[in-house]
Image (tube, helix red, strand yellow):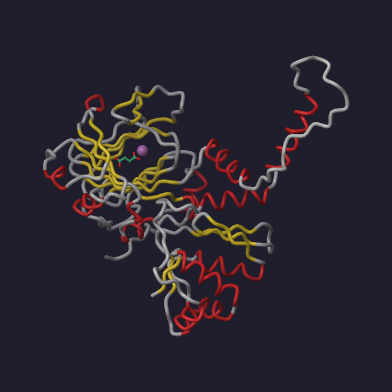
Amino acid sequence: MSIPELNSAFDVQDFLANYWQKKPLYIPQLIPGFKDPISPEELAGLAMEADCESRLLEGTEPDSWKLSQGPFTESRFTELPDDGWTLLVQAVDQWNEPVFDLKQLFRFLPQWRIEDVMVSFAANGAGVGPHFDYYDVFLVQGSGERNWQIGPKYSSKSKLKNCSGLSILEEFEAVADYTLQAGDALYVPPQYAHWGKSQQRSLCYSIGCRAPSAAEILEGYSDFMIDRCEPEDRYTDPLTQMPKRRGEIDTQSVSNSFRKLVETIDNEENYYRWFGQFATRPKIQNSISGPEQPYTETELLADLTGGAVIAINPSSRFSFLELKPGGKTLFFVDGESIDLAPQLSWFAHSLCKAPEISKQDIKKITQTPESLAYILRLLNQGSLISY
Ligand code: SIN
Ligand code: CO
């Protein structure tokens, strides 16, 4: 199957300046000549796998829906009626190479921001009801037609009803209406309501973004900082006199404790490190594992000089952050960080240019012991693969 391409008429600069995180955009023929990267049968096959997250929504009216979680048996699919059900499969890019290729088209966004590609197959008349998500999403239409109604921006204060475990807007008023055909797309910013209804049997590819909530950031960064606390880092109070009022908590001591807390978290390098680790956490935990027989440095060197290809494991996430221009680089791989001195920053840049390390960079790696050691480590943990 040929690798899809974005329509050359799609103006990325205009999109980023005027629509990204601002307002919805209908993009006819974002991917001209679009062919489904996965068939409905293959999608159903994935939904039968225990490690793959999938849901089946039966019924056309939210009030009478039935939502079931996968994995499903084959007979579950053969017994379904012709109309009125939707199969939703999460992170299909992790299981299917052509869907992974589709995700690569969105490289005009920072790589870490793309969370996954969810694929939905909807029978005639089906849809998941009027709702909003807290992240940006590109809805790319595959075969069949789907009608999308777009509403205004809603919030956590908007009235919702729980329909079989899905949060549906109680009041939805469409402000725009589009019927999407293969290759057409809709960009929907966070909190904008949308409601898709399949006109026939249709496939839709939702390219969703990673957008941590303030609560997740607070929790994640706190956990990261907790791991760095020593038992002797404790509350202290330089008491100079006896408490005047029984039961009173002395504001001066609490304020000292508060200042210490603020000083502990007010460390940009720590925060950047946590952020990069968070941003590169694999979508599916335990999806990355090294070879049964770890490589030795001698084997690796022999393979590399013999022309071996080093590629990124499609489940792996690589990113980097330069602390200041020309300074140390924090290189993030699958939720871990590696500190690179400025003269090794090229190594991070090279590995982030997925899917394969260039021949020129392989030569450089074989000549630089530190980078060779990192390649060995990443191969043995499964973030890189060699063939
Ligand atoms: C769908 O594929 O039907 C739902 C996708 C979405 O609303 O984000
Ligand atoms: Co949605």
How many badges with numbers are in the image? 0
The residue drawn where x is 76% and y is 18% is 248
| Residue 207 screen position, x and y as percent | 38, 48
Nearer to us in this view, 138 or 348? 348
**Above or below, comparing residue 235 to residue 95 in the picture:** above
Quadrant of the image containing the C terminus: bottom left
Which residue in the rendered view is the most extreme toward the top? 245
Nearer to us in this view, 331 or 143? 331
Quadrant of the image containing the N terminus: bottom left
**Above or below, comparing residue 182 to residue 357 in the picture:** above
Q: Indicate the quadrant where residue 325 lies.
A: bottom right
| Residue 355 screen position, x and y as percent | 43, 67
Asked if residue 352 lies left or right of residue 182, the reply is right
| Residue 334 screen position, x and y as percent | 49, 57
The residue drawn where x is 52% and y is 46% is 17
| Residue 363 screen position, x and y as percent | 53, 81
The residue drawn where x is 32% and y is 46% is 53
Nearer to us in this view, 263 or 212? 263
- Which quadrant of the figure shows ligand 2? top left
Nearer to us in this view, 235 or 138? 235
Q: Indicate the quadrant where residue 131 lies.
A: top left
Asked if residue 295 lies left or right of residue 34, the reply is right
